[in-house]
Amino acid sequence: MKNIITHEGRVVLVTGAAQGIGQAIALALAQRGASVIATDLHMPHETIEKIGSNAVGFELDVTQEENWQAVLRQSKAVGEVDIVVNNAGYFPNRPIDELDLPTWRRTMATNLDAHFLSAKYFLPSMRKKKWGRFIGISSNMVGLSIPGMSHYIASKMGIIGFMRGLANDVANDGITANAILPGLTNTLATAVQSDEQKRATWEQQAIKRLGDPEDITGTVLFLTSDDASFITGQAIVVDGGQYRVG
Ligand SMILES: NC(=O)c1ccc[n+]([C@@H]2O[C@H](COP(=O)([O-])OP(=O)(O)OC[C@H]3O[C@@H](n4cnc5c(N)ncnc54)[C@H](O)[C@@H]3O)[C@@H](O)[C@H]2O)c1
């Protein structure tokens, strides 16, 4: 089958790309012709090897501003970044009576500060090119009644709010900003859940199966393509029809 090359010439940076949803996103964008900068807390060797010559890897702790500055410098060797996918996430379960300030702050730093920092450092080159895409990986949990996740839900609602606001500030330069809300997805992060727990979630979906990382990538490909140039400030739910909005 012929490859559909929707992202040829684009340079994309993906955070949390060593495994799970982030790795699937990096692979999918590479398949569509993008040059991929795969980043994670540790060098995402597996992702880079799977992609081959079209990928480079950098260590990027998304909570650390100096790390963003370093990756901005290092990324110039690949080219100016056109697309940023903020996927790295932190999601410990802590009922409100057990939630402490360090956990709250780490959740906000990982899930929310990162989006602001990526805009601060990668927006200028997008503005020059009059083209850019920001994708924030939020979660459908913002609409579910799952206990112990108040900090996480607050941060994931924050992503939706930031994308709405960012969309307004960058619209005149051909740049869009959108959030994607995956449902329960089969990754190492959710491997701790029993099959019964997972089934209890996916049975609430219209499409009755557990989501795979590859179920999330199509929406990323679309929103980061030219086809989606008139879509911005949106929150798109990708969960097999569990959470219905509107
Ligand atoms: N798996 C799900 O069911 C699900 C559902 C909805 C939303 N999400 C969101 O999707 C994203 C990816 O989830 P996943 O299931 O693939 O998780 P995962 O734990 O498998 O992968 C997350 C990656 O992020 C990296 N990471 C964590 N903290 C980081 C930091 N400070 N800096 C850089 N990288 C960091 C980890 O090293 C890891 O490689 C997260 O934002 C998560 O909230 C996941």
Image (cartoon, grey):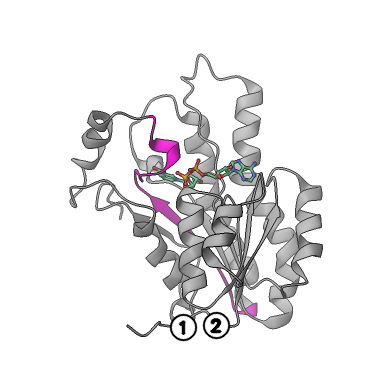
Identify the residue at image location x=43%, y=81%.
227
> Which residue corresponds to the image point at 61% horizontal and 52% vertical from the top-left?
44
Instruction: Pick out the residue farthest to the top.
Output: 97
For the residues bearing labels 2 and 1, Cβ distance under 8 angstroms: yes
- The residue identified by callout 1 is 5
Is residue 7 visible in the rendered structure shown here? yes
Q: Depth check: give the residue in front, 105 or 81.
A: 81
Q: Amino acid at mark 2?
A: Glu
Find residue 42 and report its image quarter: top right
On the image, the x and y values in percent for residue 167 come to 57, 66
The residue range painted magenta reads: 173-192
Q: Residue at x 61, y 26 (%)?
A: 103
Give the quarter of the figure containing the C terminus.
bottom left
Q: Is residue 178 visible?
A: no
Relative to 107, 72 lies left or right: right
Q: Find numbered disc 1 in the image and state the secondary structure of the residue it sits on.
A: loop
Magenta highlight on residue 188: yes
Q: Residues within 10 Å of mark 2 (few under 14, many from 20)?
A: some
The answer to which of 87 and 176 lies nearer the viewer is 87
Asked if the magenta segment contains residue 201, the reply would be no
Query: Relative to residue 147, is residue 65 depicted above or below?
Result: below
Q: Is residue 140 above or below residue 152?
A: below
Q: Residue 22, percent across and down? A: 51, 54
Q: Amino acid at mark 1?
A: Ile
In the image, residue 79 lies at what x, y percent?
72, 75
Tell me the number on the disc at residue 8: 2
Q: CA distance from mark 2 to mark 1?
A: 6 Å
Which element carries disc 2, helix, strand or loop?
loop
